[in-house]
Each structure stands twice: as C-alpha cells, then as structure tokens.
Image (spheres, rainbow, N blue to C red):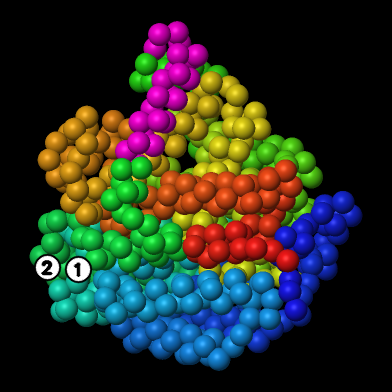
Amino acid sequence: MTYDASSADMSAADSAGATYPHDVTSRPQTAIDGVADAFVETLLELDPGFATSLGLPGYETEYRDYSPAGHIALAEATQEILDRLDDLDPTDEVDRVTLDAMRERLGLELEIFETGWDLAALNNIASPAQEIRAIFDLMPTDTVQDWIHIAGRLHNVPDAISGYMSSLRAAAEDGVVAAKRQVRTVIGQTERYAEDGGFFDSLAASAAESDAEVSADLAGRLKEGAQRAKQAYRNLSQMLSDELLEAAPENDAVGRQFYTLMSRRFLGSTVDLEETYQWGIDELDRIIAEQEDVADQISAGAGVAEAIEVLDADPQRQLQGTESLQQWMQQLANKAVEELAGTHFRIPDIMRTIECRIAPTQEGGIYYTGPSDDFSRPGRMWWSVPEGEDTFTTWRETTTVYHEGVPGHHLQIGTATYQRGLLNNWRRNACWVSGHGEGWALCAERLMSDLGYLDDPGDRLGMLDGQRMRAARVVFDIGVHLGLEMPQRWGSGVWTAEKGYEFLKQNMSISEGQLEFEFTRYLGWPGQAPSYKIGQRLWEEIRDTVEEQEGDRFDQSAFHTRALNMGSVGLDTLRRALTAPRD
C-alpha cells in the first residue's frame, strides 16, 4: 500500500467552504500512527501545559514535573516509544516519514538528556523560568470555569518552581550551569514577574473586568494564587542570586560538543559548522549589497544607514502607541490571508482567522502561537514591546507580519493542525523543528517579495533588514560558541561576546532594548537563532532539487502544499521525503 501526501490537498475545502475536519483527506490509522498517538497521550499526562497549548480539556490547572524525576520519566517514555517502533514496518509514505522523524527527534533528545543540560535550562526566552508564567497567556478567560482553572494553576506555580529549582541544583552539582549573563538576566525577569502590581496581580485583578461573573470567593482565590505565584518567583530569584550566580561561568560560549547537539536539535539536520559559518559570511555580504541597491532607490546616493534614517523619519511609516501597532498588524494579516487564499495557497475557511495581540510582557520579541486542536482558539501573533517603546515603523515590520502570519507560521502550523485525517497527533501537534518552521517563514518572506507584496522600496529594505539580521546571527552564533576567527572587516582575533555585540549592532537595525534582548538570547539559546537562515537555505536546496527532478512538471504551489502537509519535521527527514523517487 502506498500513499502520496501530495494528494491530500485542501482544494475541496476551499471551493466548497466546508468546515473542519470532515473535508480533510483521510487514510487508515496504522500501527505506527498508534504508537505516535500513544506517545502524545503520554506527553499530555507528563506535561499538562502541552495540553493547554493545544486547547485540550482536562489538564487546565497542573504543571509538568520540572524536577529531575520529571526529566527521567520523559526519557524513559521516549526510550519505550523507540523500542516499540523498532518492531514496526511502515505501510505507506506517511508512515515512512513518521518513522524517520520519530527516530531522529526522539533519539536526539535522549542524547541531550545524557548531557544533563536540560536540567540546567536557563535563558532569557525559552526556559522553565518563562514557561511557567507564559502558559497563562494561552488560557481562556471567558467563563467562570476558565477563572477557576486559572486560580488552580496559580496555586500550583510554587510546586512547578520548586521542581525547577531542584533540577538547577542537581545540574549544578554535576558542574552544568548556564552562563552568568543568563542567570543575571533571569533574576531580573523573575523579579519583574514577582512585583506587586505586576503580571500575576494584574492577571488576578482582570477577572473583575471580564464578562464572567466571578464571585467574591473566586476573586479571593485568584488573589491568593497570585500571591503564591509571586512568592514562588521571589524564591527562584533568591536561589539564582544566592546559589547559581556564583557557580555560573563567565564565558558565554558553550563549546563545540554541546553546540553540535543544539544545532541538530534546531535543524533536524547535521551540517558542517565551519562551512556554514563561511556561507553565513558570504550571505551577509550578498544581502548588504542588495540593501545598498535598494537604499539608492529610497534616496539617491544614500547608503543603508541614511536610507533607514529617511524611512524612520517618514510620518506615513510611523505608528504611535501599541493600540495602533496592534490594529495595523491585524489589518495587514487579514489582507494577506484574503488575497493569498485560493490563489497562491490553499487556505480553508477555518484557517483564515488570525489574531494579532500585544503580549502581556515587555521582554522584546515577536512570536506566534498556534491554534487549538479544534481551532476554537485561533492562531495568534504576539508582540512583546520593551518598556518605554511607543513608536513603531511599518517599513521594518511588514515582512514580519508575513513571517508570523500568512504565508509564514500561521499557514504552516495551521495546515499541520488541519490535517487530522492525514497525520497522526505527534506529527500534527508534538513535533516542531525550528529550522523547518523558521526556515519556511523566511522562505515565505522572500516569496511575498517575489509576488510583489514588498515592491515598495521601504518595505523591501525592511525584508532585507530582517534577512541581514538572520545572516548575521549565523556568523555570530557559530563564531562565538565555537570560538572561531572573526572576519577582518568586522574585527580581528577570536570571537567574544563583547565583539559580537558590536558586530550585531552594526548589522541589526533595531532598538537598544531589542538588541540587548536578542544578544542575550543568542548566547543563552545556542543554535536556535541560526536555524532560521540555515533552515531557509536547506528549504531552498530541497525545492531546487525537486524542481530539477521534475523539470517542466514542477509546480511551486503544489510543492508548497505537499511540503506543508507533512507538518514540521527535521530538515534531513524533509529532504528524504520530498526528493525520494515517487511511484
């Protein structure tokens, strides 16, 4: 039996306006699907926050076990699934991709578990310090029951924080500790979370402003939960200050061995790091040359810096206040969906809603959260605006809306969620590979340029500005963490964090607050930032290979449909799946 994933398109849904999930192409569930779905059920039990991210009921108040015992339980469950897969053979192409992807993803996670670094996870963007708070952003607030769930989870924050602290201590005993810069940064974040009148107090108080009729008893329980959560974060902050800071190394670089693992985690591909570093340098030079050509269109004879000054000073390209920013994001996202659906992409009705929101934090960064499993909660684009920033420029961020929305993450993640009849739950909801996802989003930006959506020289310079940043991150991230030689035109000698900051400052046209956030992120989350541009490179290589194989039969829209219908998988898995001979 064979099954071609490219046949599972969404054209019927588009033309008939049918609703999810009855119009999705289906295939019989296989034994491999059963094992994959069983693993998702185990993940839901082990990590209730994962269930909240999917919008699934029954796990609304709990947290995962952040202690060493919780990590061991996950590793044991992972090994059990790999053992079960060893006894199974694929029945079709979908199975073959699932088997390839699960062996690569789960096997790698076990390798990382053995290093002990997951116990030591601590950085400014994607560690339990942020996750424990951030799950509240995804919890609904429409009904009394919703607020009961929030109160329950608030009361469970202390146990989650306690488990996390025990993991940090266990890792420290083995000599595995994040760098001092990350520890100091997270101390600042946790202090802000714990402030009187800060996030937790505001969350509890907002119940009175909701449409739900919250009783005095429930309001009191919310307030008490907020106090418990604040105290837990104060305890974490104190522990980081008193215990971890002294043990933390000054050096930000993680070294080749760990960096290689992280590069594989974020790419799902093994790349030659030195060759990729040199490619990043060459790509940065190419993008700068393209920027200079566009800058000349904006102001004859001007360089890139001068063109940016012209764009920043243009009142037609400015937004004042976060409300204006949110409205602009929403209008542009809606317009992209409306114009691309049924023309360049197949977007069923249920995927055509995206919400643009200002995040409840002030940490910097723009990000996307996917829809719930049944689409009752739509996909959302979030902007975390640093404190004090109140003026925004549209020329910089037009391409960002396409990156986070359509045809970027919203189309990509929504498509995987939509394909219930084609993909098992692990493929749809549990497997996310940064290089696949972010690489696609950068391809989407370039595609929008090719389609004429960035013909305005300012908007095009904004796209190139983002591409330049992503290329610079490849150079910075690999260079600093592996201790390579700096290119002479950017400095001299071996990379250091301090040299890297000046390099980023020259290549990233962002605010000081955003720059500080991004710089710290790259140092504390090795391998993740380069996965965007390297992922784009690998996506484009795969597309070019398929085009060469198919010749005149190649159709870019059909290629995109086939690729996105696979969900997020490692890029080596994607390459094997898309370039293998087809019946």
Furthest residue toward right: 16
State the SS at label 1.
loop
Residue 295 lies in the magenta-colored region: yes
Q: Position of residue 400 (x, y in %)?
A: 52, 39
Determine the residue positioned at 39% across, 12% down: 302
Quarter of the image that includes the C terminus: bottom right
Q: Residue furthest top?
A: 300
For mark 2, what is the residue? Answer: 247
Q: Residue furthest left?
A: 246
The answer to whether the residue labelled 2 contacts the one labelled 1, judged by CB atoms less than 8 Å apart, is yes
Q: Is residue 90 left or right of residue 488?
A: right
Q: Quadrant of residue 289?
A: top left
Label 2: how many residues lie within 10 Å, few (<14), some (14-19) or many (20+)? some
Q: In the rendered image of this protein, does residue 547 appear above or below residue 19?
A: above
Q: Which mark is residue 5?
A: none
Q: Tell me the kind of residue under disc 2.
A: Ala
What whole-number distance in Å separates the C-alpha atoms at marks 2 and 1?
7 Å
- Residue 357 visible in the shown view: no
Residue 268, how many percent across, how many down?
Answer: 45, 63
Relative to residue 434, is residue 54 depicted above or below?
A: below
Instruction: Return the residue nearer the eye: 96 or 536.
Output: 96
Q: Is residue 382 magenta?
A: no
- Which residue is tagged 1? 177
Residue 515, given in percent of the width and then of the height, sits at 32, 40
What secondary structure prevails in the magenta region?
helix
At 72% from the left edge and 81% from the top edge, which residue is drawn?
A: 29
- Find numbered disc 2 in the image and state the secondary structure of the residue it sits on: helix
- Across and down, in percent, residue 80 comes to 47, 90
* Residue bounds of the magenta highlight: 280-302
User: Residue drawn 65% across and 87% down?
Assistant: 31
The three-letter amino acid code for the residue at tag 1 is: Val
